[in-house]
Each structure stands twice: as structure tokens, then as C-alpha cells.
Image (cartoon, grey):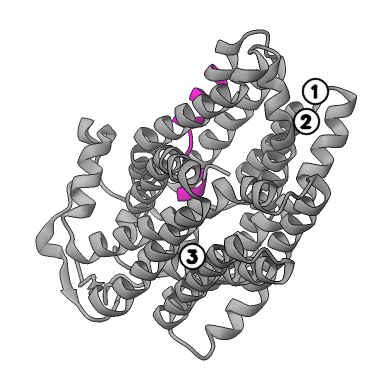
Amino acid sequence: MKPQDLDFKMENFSIDTAINLPENNPAPKVKSQKQLWIIIGIVVLNSIGMSIVLPLLPFIVGKYLPSGQVVVGMSALMSVFAACTFFAAPALGALSDRYGRKIILIISLLGSVIGYVLFGIGGALWILFLGRIIDGLTAGNISTLFAYVSDSTEPKERSKWFGFIGSAMGIGKLGGPALGGLLGSINIALPFYITAGLIFLSGLAVYFLLPESSTPEKRTKQITLKSFNTFSHLKDIFSLKAIKSLLILGVLFCAGQGIFQFNFILFLKDIYKWGPAFIGAMLTLVGIFDIATRALLLPRLLQHFSEKTIGIAGLIGMGIGLGLIVASTFVPSVIIISLAIIFIISGSGLFEPTYNGTLSQSVDETQQGKLQGVNQSLQSVNNMLIPLGAAAIYFFSPGMLYATATFIVLAAAILYSKLLPQPKCPAV
């Protein structure tokens, strides 16, 4: 999913060592969890749809480019989408703070529908790029969904629900690629139309079943031209020292995770000489542990440990897993690489939801969309830059690449445990 202004008034914020919400403006309590389970269902539908088309992208691009240029074309499509998301997500987040989550979520989903329909129609390479541009410029669904969960839950419940969202994505990714390959063998464009249909159903579910989570009194009061300036949003958010530390922590995590995700299949092919069957089995292991960690393990740990403790443990686990990949370059072993995956995926599943839960508590309700939009924008920058830098290091040495990822993730763990003040939002 994809994977989003009112000026900040600095006097309304102070830094403390604990996270508290405004005393006279508490988080809305969920009268029913029905709307949150609707969100989970929407995430599953979107994840299935997007994973269906993944196996077909090289073949679609290959219709318009020589075989030697397909990788370049796919990289360009990914970069265009990430660039559009970088500029659009903060503005969409600010708009959701002003006009509500529901309308922005519907616009975002409809943008995806149009993008995938254009891919199915095809006919020329520029049409594919147009689809990616439209999809990217409306890419606010992840940040809006996170803002919706923040609106609808008590602070202590958010990490659990963010974990459920992550596991829902994992469920969609498990069967999607196989289904996409089957549908693509019938007609190469069919999976793209199926995806557009699933996302359109998600939009209908939002319109008819999902209540608005941001009440009028909790919204920002005006929108200015500055609201559409991505760099203004970044400046506002990063001017808050504690939130700046949190976002830097998230960037480090995404860098380490991105190195693993963008190069792991190539690593298995080059170092282990595995074919599609073995690689597919390993990716299934990834999906199983991702779902189990986020949906089963995390809620139980949250009953006994703080979000910060769980997050640090997750980063350390990721560091151990990445270190095991480095070791496997010297001693290739199925056991070592399997343990590496278990540590990395479990660690990511523990850190990411607790990080998002902590991040959501760093501002009040009127800024949730803006903050989540900036967070998504930073992830888009990672998605543009990490593959390029990782490819250059991988060409020199795969072991050095994963040693770099290990260092980055362990640095994030140190930052979280030693250097990170946590913000307090006093009454406004």
C-alpha cells in the first residue's frame, strides 16, 4: 500500500522524558472496534491487490523496452512514484488534519485505481509513468490510515493496532504473487484490473462503512498555500527536537530494512545459487514470521514491557540477523540464513509498530496527518536513495553491504536507548 498546514506553534510544545497527551484534550476512546477491523480488512484487500501485480511488472515493462533496459525502466518507475509520494504525502496529511481522514483516504484509493487501470491499458511507456505519477500524487493511504488509528485509539493501544496493520499487509503478500502469476498466464493485463477492482472495493468500504475519525473540533482551522509545501512541513516537524530524534531513528531503521529487502533475493541467487523454488520458500518463511510477530507475539509483549523496550529489542534482533547474513558470506548455510531471516523479520515486526505508536503520541490530534505524511515522505526518500547506494556497495562486496546494514541498525538501537528524549504535548 502507499506506503502521506497550519504552522506549528512552538509555545504549545515542551520536551519531557515521558509521553503524555493533552490533559484537556484526551485521545478519543473507541466505543466499538468495528471501524478498526474495517481498516484491517481494507489493508488486506490493498495488500493482496498490490502483491498480485509484482510478478508481472518486468513483463509489462518488457513490452516497451529491450530486455537489457527493463531493470532501468522498473527503477525509473519506482523512483517516479517515490518522488511524487515525497511531495504529496505531507500535503495530504495536512489536508486530512483539516478536512478529515475519510475524504483523503477515498481520494488516495481512487488515485491507485486509476494508476492500475492505466497499467492494464498500457499501449506506451509514458502511460505506465502517468499511472505511477497519479498513484504517487495521491499516495496518502498509509499515513491517513495511521492517523485514523491514532484518532480512534488510546495511546497505549496504538502499537498493537499498528502491529495488526502490518500483519494484515503480510497476509496479503503471502498469496498475492502466486495468484498474480496465475492470472498473468491468462492475460498479462488481468492482474492490474483485478487490483484496481480490489482497491475500488476498499474505497466503497471506506465510503459506506467507515465513520470519520477526526471530529471537527479536533481539526486544524485553516489551509494555506504553505500547506502544500513539503519542505515547510519537514521544517516544522524537524524543528521539534524530540520528534526530530524519532524521525531520524525511523530513517535509520528504514535504511537497514531497505538494504535487506532490495538485495536479499539477489544475495540468495548469487551466494547460495538458489533457484526460484528455494527463494520462494524463504520468502514464505518471511511472511509467516512477519504475521506471527505482529499479530501474536507483539500484543502479548505489550502487556509486560514498554514500547521502548520492545523497540530496542527489535532493533537488536535485526542487527543480529543482519550480522548472520554477513557470516553466511563466509560460511553459506541454510540454518544460518534461516536464523538470519527469523531475527530480521521478528525484530522488524517488534520495532516498526512500537515506533509508529510512539511517533503518534508525539503530537496532538490536530497534527497527526501532517506528522504521518512527513514520516511517509521520508520513507519515500529512502526508497529512492537506498537501492542506488546499496547496489553500488553490493557490486563491491555483498558482505560489506550487510555489515553496513548491521552497523546502521545497531546505531539506531543506541540512539533509541541513550540519546532519544521523548516529547510531551501539554494542554493547548
Instruction: Determine the secondary structure under disc 2.
Output: helix
Within the magenta stretch, is there residue 79? no
Q: Which residue is mark 2?
A: 191
Badge 2 amino acid: Pro
Horizontally, residue 154 falls left or right of residue 60, namely: left
Percent of width and height locating residue 135: 53, 29
Task: Specify the segment rendered in magenta.
Answer: 130-144
Q: Quadrant of residue 70?
A: top right
Percent of width and height locating residue 290: 65, 65
Instruction: Determine the secondary structure under disc 1.
Output: loop
User: Can you name the residue that lies furthest to the front here?
Assistant: 330
* Distance between the alpha carbons at the discs numbered 1 and 3: 35 Å
Within the magenta stretch, is there residue 141? yes
Percent of width and height locating residue 213: 48, 56
Whether residue 14 is visible, yes or no, is: yes
Q: Residue at x 49, y 74 (%)?
A: 314
Instruction: Determine the secondary structure under disc 3.
Output: helix
Q: Residue at x 83, y 49 (%)?
A: 277
Q: Quadrant of the N terminus?
A: top right
Badge 1 amino acid: Ile
Q: Which residue is mark 1?
A: 188
